[in-house]
Image: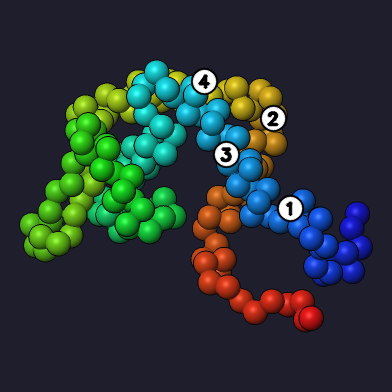
Amino acid sequence: MPRTQDILSPPTSIDTQNHCNCTALRKASRRLSHLYDSVLAPSGLKSTQYSILSEIRRLGEKPPTMRELADALVMDRSTLGHNLRPLERDQLVSLEAAETDRRRKYVVLTRKGRAAFAESNKLWHSAQVLFETNFGIAKAAELRGILLGIAADATLTSPTPNPVTR
């Protein structure tokens, strides 16, 4: 168990990589993205694209607006727009203007998009099983809970003053 002094003291430059939460999370994210991308490859979708289709589907019958989808995916609208372009080009989603405000765009899962999601969902499931088999089902569920908690914590979006005084 680390001592309080160890937790509050900034790590030396040699230790920084091992103590950096962001670095550890990014390394794990790259590893898992590679796994899911490899398994999803036969569908022609990348894990980021699968996530977008999945989120649109999860949000229900009423198509989400660009803002609603960006918020649900915890990304800014410009990044979402960039990620939607190939899905729109491949006719998996369509962007439809609202009747009352033409600037407001709804992201609609097309028939082709629903079919692509159904096919890729089978592959995604096999990636999920592979990860949970190697990592452990209970640990995977705990990890998802922790990560979703971090994703939902709006206090982590704006930096606060460093508690360590130098």
Q: Secondary structure at mark 1?
A: helix
Return the mark for residue 30.
Answer: 3
Q: CA distance from mark 3 to mark 2?
A: 16 Å
Q: CA distance from mark 2 to mark 4?
A: 14 Å
Relative to 24, is 114 above or below? above
Residue of label 2: 135
Residue of label 1: 17
Image marks 2 and 1: residues in contact by CB distance under 8 Å: no
Q: CA distance from mark 3 to mark 4?
A: 18 Å
In-front residue for pair 72/159: 159
Q: Residue furthest left?
A: 99
Relative to 32, is 15 above or below? below
The residue shown at (42%, 22%) is 41
Relative to 137, is 19 above or below? below
Q: Which amino acid type corresponds to the residue marked 2 in the rendered image? A: Phe
Residue 129 image position (x, y, % from top left): 58, 23
Residue 93 image position (x, y, % from top left): 23, 38
The residue shown at (12%, 53%) is 97
Q: Residue furthest front?
A: 13
Q: Which amino acid type corresponds to the residue marked 3 in the rendered image? A: Arg
Q: Which amino acid type corresponds to the residue marked 1 in the rendered image? A: Gln
